[in-house]
Amino acid sequence: MLIDFFTQETPTSSFIQDVFSTVNYDVNLHITDTYAGADFLLKSVDKLSPLVIWDLDSFSDNLQALTQIREKNPDTLILVYGESLDRYSELSNKLYDIILSVEAIKLHLMSKISKLKEIYNARKVFSERMSHLVGNSDAMQKLRKSVERAIIHTGPVLIQGETGVGKELIARAVSCVYDKFVTVNCSAIPDNLFESELFGHTRGAFTGAQNERIGLFEAADGGAIFLDEIGDMPLHTQVKLLRVLQNKEIRPIGANKTKHIDVRFIAATNRDLKEAVRNKTFREDLYYRLSVIPLKISPLRERREDIEDLANYFIQQYQAPGEQFTLSRAALEKLQKHPWPGNIRELENVIQRALCFATSTLISPEDLQLDEPQDFPKIQDIPAAETYDEFREMQLDQEREFLRNKIRENNGSVRATAEQLGLLRTALYNRLSHLGIDVKDLK
């Protein structure tokens, strides 16, 4: 790992150099007088390494150079230190990522360097994992930068966005530095089971508690916990969550002692939590505790310039080996005009279906089946869906039944079914695999 270190010759700077040398870090040392140092920085801000260490005492009169480093290198990790941090109380925290006193440097540098290395490696993992966070719109570029910054800090994160925009994807990116990632779907837990699920319980804590159970908070100790659809959490559980956030302690049901946990909290919702606070269905104090680092994901209809890149990404993801599908211009125009109530998840489903039913490798508007009625049961025969996710799952169930019936009509022959439907056989196999249909069960 390469580091740029800007300082003057002092016992502290010598100590820091010695520590870095013990962990085999390459240090570009810039020891110069105050004004020359500033001139050098202003000329070389575009050539800095991923980590900059800045001695505040050495360059206290030239903080404009630090400002330019941050402006020109927003992704560079900046650690600043000084003899007395009170002198720099008005220094904007936007100019640095970590600030330490000289005493803290001497006492804790090894652990801090270990953390810096962890963060640096996390950023590399982030870049690899987020290669599938597709889109070059202003909203997506801003979101990527916000996520990368969120990795560095340990405060709670609140992700807000409509259903299908990819909130869990963002949560996993934020937590990429942790080995553990525990997901909690708050909308799927009955109100009377919330406390047991999250906090766990001892044996005999209540009727039916025949064995001790570790709660999800404790299971996430040392890692991250993702509280999906936090807006659905009942008020009585919100109070207990607030205490966990404040004290980092849990008490399983029936236990006499509390347990300390070290957990990164990430929450997500498709609701307007500010409105929920006004309606008194969500605690205001919990809202502010969770939204230390807020991340907002724009719906797909507000960033239509990303649709082409996303569609091509899904084509590459789901087309069968050896095939090379492309979107026709007319098909792309149709995608860009669609309102996308289901956001990216809906687009993904549309592309998968198009790859299955396309009659050639050039996907036409008709292949997208955005407007055409499907050969499925009439809408009045379909149970009403409460959420868009339920509606999409119903559509997939109908598609499964449609394909099963067609295969049965052809005595279990996928080749004959593909010919009847005007599909490539490999495309049909690919779709059957995605839908979890085993052809052997249909013969």
Image (cartoon, grey):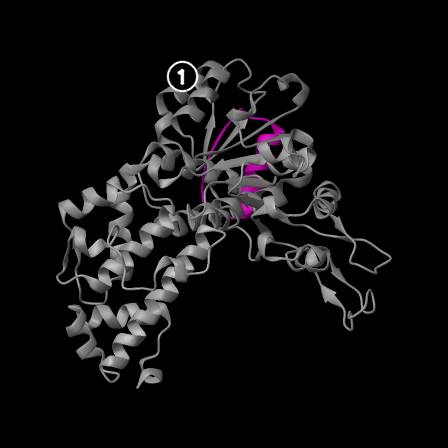
Is residue 158 positioned above or below 368 on the image?
A: above
Is residue 402 positioned above or below 11 on the image?
A: below
Q: Give the x, y percent position of residue 57.
A: 59, 20
Is residue 146 positioned above or below 209 on the image?
A: above
What residue appears at the point 41 percent right and 45 percent down from the top-left corner? 165
Magenta residues span 1-24
In magenta stretch: residue 5: yes
Looking at this view, name the residue that lies furthest to the front.
Answer: 380
Q: Give the x, y percent position of residue 250.
A: 76, 52
Relative to 209, 59 lies left or right: left
In magenta stretch: residue 14: yes
Q: Number of numbered discs present? A: 1
Can residue 361 be seen at all in this image of the molecule?
yes
Q: Secondary structure at mark 1?
A: helix
Q: Residues within 10 Å of mark 1 (few under 14, many from 20)?
A: few
Q: What amino acid type is highlighted by mark number 1?
A: Asp
**Which quadrant, please, contains the C terminus?**
bottom left
Quadrant housing residue 397 = bottom left
Nearer to the camera, 298 or 53: 298
What residue appears at the point 50 percent right and 17 percent down from the top-left corner? 63
Q: Give the x, y percent position of residue 88.
A: 62, 19
Can residue 292 be seen at all in this image of the molecule?
no
Quadrant housing residue 74 = top left
**Which quadrant, please, contains the N terminus?**
top left
Q: Give the x, y percent position of residue 154.
A: 60, 41
Relative to 230, 364 lies left or right: left
What residue appears at the point 39 percent right and 58 percent down from the top-left corner? 380
What residue is pinned by disc 1? Answer: 39
